[in-house]
Each structure stands twice: as structure tokens, then as C-alpha cells.
Image (cartoon, rainbow, N blue to C red):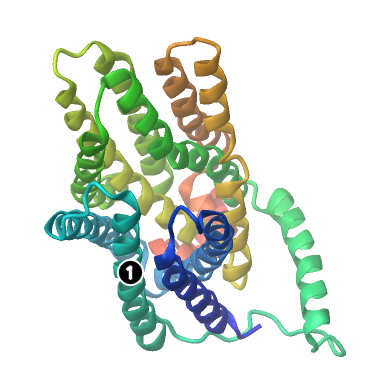
């Protein structure tokens, strides 16, 4: 339909209202707040899906090289604002004398969060995110809401089959790699807290500062992404970023436990951030280039599903290993192994970059001549 922008606005409004309600979080309200948090997670996934649908259109408008710089800037700004927000909350909680009260600090953070996103979501959707026409026409007699939903579900099924059968060089392998890569990266924050606290010996303040260092490391990492992409292509650059992230995680996991100074972990945190800053913009650029025209919003939903479908597995493996007396460093290795497996899938499954672009119908983003690319495939 033509309601992509409206869907994004609706999810954003509900999400913002949930953040406002959660200012009242406390020991007596934790259960309803947990329910609201799950609803907020659903809305957040909807916002991500809607926003991702714009990336391929930006790539088509400006070309792959410029878009690689844009995705790097998006990531750098995102993590910069996260770091500034973390410092703002920490500074204000200390100034107000509530830094030792987690409930008051959480309420302060939620209040600042609601204020900031109300301004940024409002300005972003109103001024910068345009409405888009429907990607395909609905059949006659299927104009009501129920028919649209049922037709959409049938279209999802047809799209899933076409991804498997027709997009065998790029998109299929991107989504498969996304399943494993995002499950590892998503678990990194949670499992790192356990590892840093139980093995390295960092206290709560140290862990907060560790993640601030990680956020600061993502900024130069985002600048590294377009450099590597320009010298190779988004597929190879994303594979290298995952291999480097694997090496970084494993190196820290197997050395920090015996380190003479626990604060050496901050150096590790910086390099973790460097690799994450490289990982995200390259991932978005790859997605922008392999997504077939006319299916931007739909396949953005497939990407969101892929990123979440195995998110429970690395934490479960880590918990099982630790609960059976296995050293946590092996749990970190198991988590990082999902990254290296994702890189392996791309290395053995994807085709040449020119073939991937031709398959998706976006070969013009790199300036590849259609006839030349067809000759390559023949």
C-alpha cells in the first residue's frame, strides 16, 4: 500500500507514549512496565522495518559509493548520540544526587528519552521521510483492511519462495547470514556484562564506562566502513568485519581473565566498538544493494525477522555452558562463532558482486552496464 510513512509514524507515536508511561517505573510497577516494554519492542521493530525500506531507494538515487558514506554517517551519528545520552544521564544523576538510586536514575533516563525522541521522531517523520507510492496494485475487490492483510500474507509466502528460487546469489544468503550475525552481535552486550563482572572483575560503574568506550570506538569504525567497501565491495567488506569482530571477541575472552590490570578491558572495548562501527553500515549498504525493486518494505520485514529469529540461542548456549561449570570464555567463543559462520555462509554462497547487483535489478547503483553483466552470467 501507500501507507509506509503512516505506518512508521503510527509505530513511533505508540513507542513514544510507552516511553512516557514508563517514567513511572518502580518496584511496584515493574510487571506492567515489562509488558509495555514488550509492546515497545514490537513497535521498535516496526519502526526499524519501515526505516530500512528507504535505504535501497537512497542507494538507487545516489549510487553505491556515496551511499556507503551515508550509511557510515548514519551509524556514526547513532552511536555518538548514544554516547552523549549515556554521559548526560550519568552527569545529571550525579548532579541530582540520585546516581546510587537505580529507580530514580531509570525515571530520569526515561524522561529524557521521551523528550528527545518526541522531538527527533516528530521532526524526522514530518520533514525528512517522504510518503511513497504503493509498490503494486491490489486486485479488484481486495481494497478493504481484511483483504489487504490476507493478500499481504499470501504475498509474503510468494516472496519467501522467490527469494529461495530466484535470488540465489545475494539476497538469500544475506538473510541467512543476518540470522547468525545479528544473533551474535545482539547477544554481545548482555553476555559481555556477565563476562566483565564475573571474570574480569569490573563493578557496575566500570561496566558503564566500558560501554561508553565501546560507543566511542564505533565512531572511527563507521569511518572505516566506506574505505574497506570502496577497495572491495559491500559483501567482502561485511565478511571481513565479521571475521575481525570474531578475532576481537575471542582475543579479549581468552586474555582478559588473566590480565594484570582489569582496566585493560577498556582497550578491548574500544576495538569491539571499532568493529561494530564497521559492521553496521556495511550491513545496511549490502542490504540496500541486494533488495529487489518494488519490495523494499516487504523484504525489510524479512530482514527484521531474520535478525531476531535466533537471538535467543547465543545467550542460551552461554548460560548452559556456565551453569555446567565451563569457563565463560568458551561461552564467549560460542557466541562469536555465530559471526564467523555468517561470514562463511556469504563466502561460499554468494556470487560475484556484479551478478548480485544484476540479480536484484540494482546494477546501476555501481554503474555496471546491464549487457556486460548479462555476458558475465552467460
The x, y position of residue 143, in whole percent, is 79, 89
Q: Is residue 65 left or right of residue 346?
A: left
Q: Quadrant of residue 251?
A: top left
> What's the residue at 50%, 33% (across, down)?
347
> What's the residue at 17%, 30% (across, down)?
267
Residue that label 1 marks: 111
Q: Nearer the viewer, residue 255 or 31?
A: 31
Q: Could one spot residue 57 in this view of the protein?
A: no
Q: Residues within 10 Å of mark 1 (few under 14, many from 20)?
A: some
The x, y position of residue 174, in whole percent, is 55, 47
Figure check: 166 above or below 57: above
The x, y position of residue 105, in whole percent, is 29, 56
Q: Nearer the viewer, residue 284 or 30?
A: 30
Q: Is residue 153 left or right of residue 182?
A: right
Figure check: 110 above or below 144: above
The x, y position of residue 261, in whole percent, is 14, 18
Figure check: 218 above or below 373: above
Q: Could one spot residue 196 in this view of the protein?
A: yes
Indicate the secondary structure of the residue bearing disc 1: helix
Q: Nearer the viewer, residue 218 or 362?
A: 218
> What's the residue at 62%, 57% (across, down)?
302
Amino acid at each position: 500500500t501507500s501507507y509506509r510513512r503512516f505506518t512508521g509514524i503510527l509505530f513511533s507515536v505508540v513507542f513514544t507514549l510507552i516511553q512516557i508511561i514508563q517514567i513511572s517505573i518502580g518496584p511496584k510497577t515493574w510487571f506492567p512496565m515489562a509488558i509495555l516494554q514488550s509492546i515497545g519492542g514490537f513497535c521498535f521493530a516496526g519502526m526499524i522495518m519501515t526505516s530500512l525500506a528507504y535505504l535501497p531507494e537512497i542507494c538507487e538515487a545516489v549510487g553505491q559509493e556515496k551511499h556507503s558514506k551515508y550509511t557510515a554517517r548514519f551509524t556514526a551519528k547513532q552511536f555518538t548520540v548514544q554516547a552523549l545520552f549515556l554521559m548526560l544521564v550519568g552527569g545529571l544523576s550525579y548532579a541530582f544526587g540520585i546516581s546510587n538510586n537505580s529507580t530514580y536514575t531509570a525515571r530520569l533516563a526515561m524522561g529524557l528519552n521521551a523528550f528527545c525522541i518526541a522531538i527527533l521522531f516528530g521532526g524526522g517523520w514530518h520533514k525528512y521521510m517522504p510518503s511513497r507510492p504503493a509498490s503494486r496494485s491490489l486486485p479488484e475487490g481486495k481494497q478493504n483492511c481484511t483483504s489487504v492483510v490476507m493478500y499481504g500474507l499470501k504475498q509474503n509466502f510468494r516472496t519467501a519462495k522467490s527469494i529461495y528460487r530466484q535470488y540465489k546469489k545475494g539476497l538469500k544468503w544475506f538473510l541467512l547470514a543476518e540470522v547468525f550475525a545479528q544473533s551474535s552481535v545482539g547477544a554481545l552486550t548482555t553476555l559481555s556484562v556477565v563476562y566483565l563482572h564475573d571474570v574480569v572483575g569490573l563493578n557496575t560503574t566500570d561496566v558503564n564506562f566500558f560501554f561508553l568506550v565501546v560507543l566511542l570506538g564505533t565512531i572511527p569504525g563507521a569511518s572505516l566502513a566506506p574505505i574497506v567497501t570502496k577497495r572491495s565491495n559491500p559483501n567482502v567488506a561485511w565478511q571481513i568485519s565479521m571475521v575481525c569482530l570474531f578475532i576481537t571477541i575471542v582475543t579479549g575472552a581468552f586474555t582478559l581473565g588473566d590480565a594484570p590490570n582489569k582496566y585493560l578491558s577498556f582497550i578491548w572495548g574500544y576495538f569491539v566498538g571499532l568493529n561494530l562501527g564497521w559492521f553496521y553500515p556495511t550491513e545496511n549498504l549490502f542490504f540496500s544493494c541486494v533488495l529487489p525493486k518494488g519490495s523494499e518494505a516487504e523484504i525489510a520485514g524479512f530482514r527484521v525477522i531474520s535478525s531476531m529469529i535466533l537471538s535467543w540461542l547465543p545467550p542460551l548456549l552461554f548460560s548452559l555452558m556456565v551453569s555446567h561449570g565451563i569457563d565463560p570464555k568458551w561461552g564467549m567463543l560460542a557466541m562469536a562463532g555465530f559471526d564467523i559462520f555468517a561470514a562463511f555462509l556469504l563466502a561460499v554462497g554468494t556470487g560475484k558482486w556484479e551478478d548480485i547487483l544484476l540479480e536484484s535489478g540494482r546494477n546501476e547503483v555501481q554503474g555496471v552496464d546491464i549487457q556486460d553483466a548479462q555476458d558475465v552470467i552467460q
